[in-house]
Structures are given as C-alpha cells and as structure tokens.
Amino acid sequence: MSRPAFALTYGPWALVAGGSEGLGGAFAEELARRGVSLVLVARRPEPLAQTAARLRATWPVEVVTVAADLAAAGAIGQVADAAAGLPVGLVVMNAAHAPAGPFLAAGEPDIAAAVHLNCGAAALLAHQFLPAMVERGKGGVIFMSSLAGLQGVPNLAVYGASKAFLISLAEALWAETRAAGVDVLACCAGAVITPGYQQAASRPAPGSLSPAQVAATALDALGHGFRVVPGRLNRVNTFVLEHLLPKRAAISVFGRATAAALNSPGGQA
Ligand SMILES: NC(=O)c1ccc[n+]([C@@H]2O[C@H](COP(=O)([O-])OP(=O)(O)OC[C@H]3O[C@@H](n4cnc5c(N)ncnc54)[C@H](OP(=O)(O)O)[C@@H]3O)[C@@H](O)[C@H]2O)c1
C-alpha cells in the first residue's frame, strides 16, 4: 500500500499506547513517515515530549501526548478525553508489563499491573476506538503480542498468558469487524532490541530484530489476516512450536530459552 493510501485508510490520526520509546517509538516514527498524526501515551512525560518533538521536527504531522499509566483506573477515560474530536483510524496497543521469575515469588501488584495493562487496557482501548472506525468503514487495531503467547512460558507465566489473551482477542475482533472494513491484527514478535529488552536480557537472542523492522512489518500486515510474525527465523520457530513439537516440549523449550535470556530470574522481561 502506498503511503498516501495508508494514511487514507488508517489515518489521519493513530494512537500508540506505549509510544515514547522502544517498539512504540518505532511505530510512531513509521506512522509519521507514512503521514499519520499521532496520539502517544506513556507514563513518563520526558521521553514522550522528546519523541513528540523529534517527530514534529522531522515529519509534517501533529503529535499529542498523554502521560498516563494505562494500568490505572480511569486511564482509558483520560486517553479518550485527549483524543476527543481526533479521527483515530489506528490503535497500536504496545505497552506491556512483564514480571519475570517464578509465579509464586511474584508480588500481587506486579501480577495486577500485568493483567490490567496487557489485557484490560488492550480490550478497553479497542472498545473505545473501534466503534468510530466501524462507523467510518475503515481503520485498524494492532495488539503487540509475542511468541511467548503461543504456549505457557515458565518464569514469565502472567506475561505469556497475557500475550495469549491478545492473540485470541485479535482473532475474535478481526472476525467481528472485517465485514465493516476494519483490520485487527496480533503482532507476535520474537526478540526485539528495545530498552525494555536490553534491561531484561543478557544478550540478543537468535533472530533478534530492530524495532523499526517489527513496526514496518506489522503496519504492512494490516488487512492481510489476524496475525503476523515478523522475521523469517521467528516464522520457522512458530511453525515448529505450533505444529511439530508436542505442547509439553514447546513449553519446556520456550522456558529454557527464556531462562537463558533473562538477566535475573527476578527481573523484568
Ligand atoms: N522487546 C521484545 O523483545 C519484545 C518481544 C515480543 C513482544 N514485545 C512486545 O512489544 C511491546 C513493546 O515492547 P518494548 O520492548 O518496546 O517495551 P519497552 O521498551 O519497555 O517500552 C514500553 C513502552 O510502553 C510504555 N509503558 C510501559 N508501561 C506503561 C503503562 N503502564 N502505561 C502507559 N505506558 C506504559 C513505556 O513508557 P513509560 O515507561 O514511560 O510508561 C514505553 O513507551 C510489548 O507489548 C511487548 O510485550 C516485545
């Protein structure tokens, strides 16, 4: 799809939840390059302001920032207020919390934050912005999921389960809205070299991609089905995990790979 056609279909505004840095920052950059104005949401105002200033200076787009914790009560209303009157044609639900380590050692606040952000905010943002897209007969939603959502992941139990939730949610919403001209997609990424990944992992995993590669692949996949797996090696791994390995073996392989990649089993992934 040409850049003007993309902006006509998924613009003129896009909302990126977790859009200040990492993969969300790359989504924002790629969307601005395609001529789409942006509502960027994240907790810390400084990285948000820096990203917004860089985008405004580089591309002919408008950028609105919302400093909000999407895991907190009332955050979706705050985002909706900030975006009121802006025709949002694309929502990228990218923010996530990933408590790492044994489930029994996890604190209640960490589990609650992961569920409220990764699952609750994702469903509520889609629920907030999809009706206007359906009414306009165009638009899209991208849920940033992960290969971790394809099977249970020991030491990333809640994170993996939340990414499975997003895969299922995307499939259902894809089916519910495609006849109206709206495209819903789960992006199942493998390792992506972001600040969050570098903090959590001791070294890049095989097949690691840049945030820019993943963002462009996901945006190009809109309108081509309910799931995309960026990267050739990740697509091969997905086929093996889903179709060739017994589930027990897939859980064990993914658990070992995760344990090897994490800096500390009690850290963040
Ligand atoms: N990196 C990988 O290897 C990888 C692999 C597969 C899937 N993914 C998925 O890709 C997405 C992005 O990952 P990433 O590595 O780019 O993460 P990241 O580097 O940690 O960036 C996360 C973004 O989300 C924002 N954010 C975090 N918690 C938030 C909250 N409670 N409310 C609002 N904003 C929040 C952060 O800004 P603030 O901190 O200022 O809030 C930041 O803008 C996640 O959904 C992740 O599960 C990543």
Image (spheres, rainbow, N blue to C red):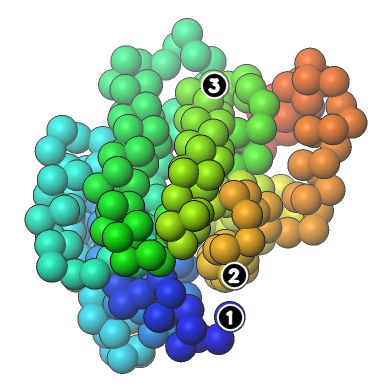
Cα separation, mark 3 vs mark 1, equals 38 Å
Position of 265 with respect to 125 (left or right) is: right
Residue 217: x and y in percent read 62, 66
Residue 134: x and y in percent read 35, 57
Please report whichever mark, 3 or 1, sits nearer to the chain's N-terminal start. Answer: 1
Position of 48 with respect to 181 (left or right) is: left
Please report whichever mark, 2 or 3, sits nearer to the chain's N-terminal start. Answer: 3
Q: Residue furthest top?
A: 104
Foreground of the two, 149 or 200: 149
Identity of the amino acid at label 1? Met
Q: At 35% from the left edge and 74% from the top edge, which residue is drawn?
A: 11
Position of 138 with respect to 159 (left or right) is: left
Residue 194: x and y in percent read 51, 57
- How many residues crowd around disc 1 within 10 Å: few (fewer than 14), some, or many (20 or more)? few
Q: Is residue 181 above or below residue 175?
A: below
Cα separation, mark 2 vs mark 1, equals 8 Å
Q: At 49% from the left edge and 55% from the top edge, which residue is drawn?
A: 179
Foreground of the two, 195 or 68: 68
Q: Is residue 177 above or below residue 115?
A: below
Kindly state the secondary structure of the residue where label 2 is placed: helix
Please report whichever mark, 2 or 1, sits nearer to the chain's N-terminal start. Answer: 1
In front of the other: label 2 or label 3? 2
Kindly state the secondary structure of the residue where label 1 is placed: loop
Identify residue for label 1.
1
- How many residues crowd around disc 3 within 10 Å: few (fewer than 14), some, or many (20 or more)? many
Identity of the amino acid at label 2? Asp
Kindly state the secondary structure of the residue where label 3 is placed: helix
Identify residue for label 3.
157
